[in-house]
Image (cartoon, grey):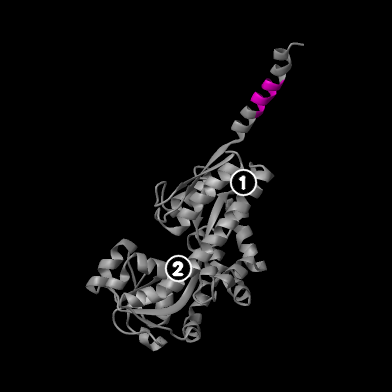
Amino acid sequence: MTTTNWIRPFLGASAIAMMAQTAMAEEWRLGHILPPDHPGNRALEAAASEIAERTEGRVDIKVFPAGQVGGAKEVLTGMTIGTHHMAFDGAGILSQWTSELGALEAPFLAKDFAHLERLIDSDKGGELVDKLREDHGIRLLDVWYYGTRHMTNNARPIETVADMEGLKVRVPEVALSLEFIKALDGRPTPMAFPELYLGLQTGVVDGQENPLPTIDAAKFYEVQDHLALTGHLVQFVAPLVAEDVWQRTSEADRAVVMDVLQAAGDAYNQSIVALEAELVEGLAGNGMQVTNPDREAFAEAVEVIFPAFEDAWGAGTYEALSAVE
């Protein structure tokens, strides 16, 4: 056998292996609505790059921020019909598919992000996550910290529940958000987020509620005098993948995806916790008067709204979650 003939079979095998590897490579489109410079988007892009490198291109995640490939509902719908592969979103929008997940958005349910993680890791939390996957083919890969929502307003410092009386508070057009403000004797006012700065500036609404990074990024400190650290809602955001996409990926590559996303999520979570701590001082420095209302009193005031959501959340769901320490 000549040298050329001896090499040729190995070249053929190598070429076949490369062709097979290329055939297995798949582009996963990950769409979400956060802006490109949001820490969550930057973390996703860095994770996608590492996953592509460690899987030698077999898992190639393309991240599309700012609604480039559709709004949150469009992307999640696309995952159920095969037109989208991944998303980055939380319990609020996911409850439109598995309504029981809405219980995780109950005001004052989670004390902080670590507690929220324990809620999701609990038997009941796991049941809800499994139901989303089994019923709709949407797999939750990890849990990342979106932020904790607080109140701002122009009328008065909020120290007690009584200080909420009559305040016109902008909320998203979500039943739970509307009932939450009503339970505090406020006046919930649905308004699109892009209209909110002007609404606050002109007095169409007195206040709003959002995580501190959002309050800062939107420069609400320019049109709001008071910040109340109510901490009424701790929210997560999750990298999600369509179950059929996940199942046609090798076990080894799935392990890489999980390893990278969990490491990226841990770093991202720490950065958001640190940012929130800095922002309290920063917003005060920008002229906002900061108060620390009694969260227990606020929590007691809103408990009356939960029975109305039992049909959507499922009998016993809220009670099971609220029992998790």
Task: From this view, report whether residue 10 is shown above or below residue 80.
Answer: above
- In which image quadrant can residue 160 be found? bottom left
Magenta segment: does it hold 215? no
Q: In terms of depth relative to the viewer, which is nearer, 156 or 93?
A: 156
Residue indicated by mark 2: 275
Q: Which residues are magenta?
A: 10-17
Instruction: Specify whether 185 is left or right of 268.
Output: left
Magenta segment: does it hold 16? yes
Residue 211 shows in the view: no
Residue at x 50% of width, y 52% of height: 44
- In which image quadrant can residue 12 be found? top right
On the rendered image, what quadrant is the N terminus found in? Answer: top right
Asked which secondary structure carries label 2, the reply is: helix
On the rendered image, what quadrant is the C terminus found in? Answer: bottom right
Q: In terms of depth relative to the viewer, which is nearer, 272 or 129?
A: 272
Instruction: Specify whether 78 is left or right of 116.
Output: left
**Given this view, does label 2 or label 1 mark the residue nearer the observer?**
2
Rendered image: mark on residue 246: 1
Q: CA distance from mark 2 to mark 1?
A: 33 Å
The image shows residue 8 at horizontal and vertical percentages of: 69, 17
Q: In terms of depth relative to the viewer, which is nearer, 205 or 155?
A: 155
The image shows residue 75 at horizontal and vertical percentages of: 46, 50
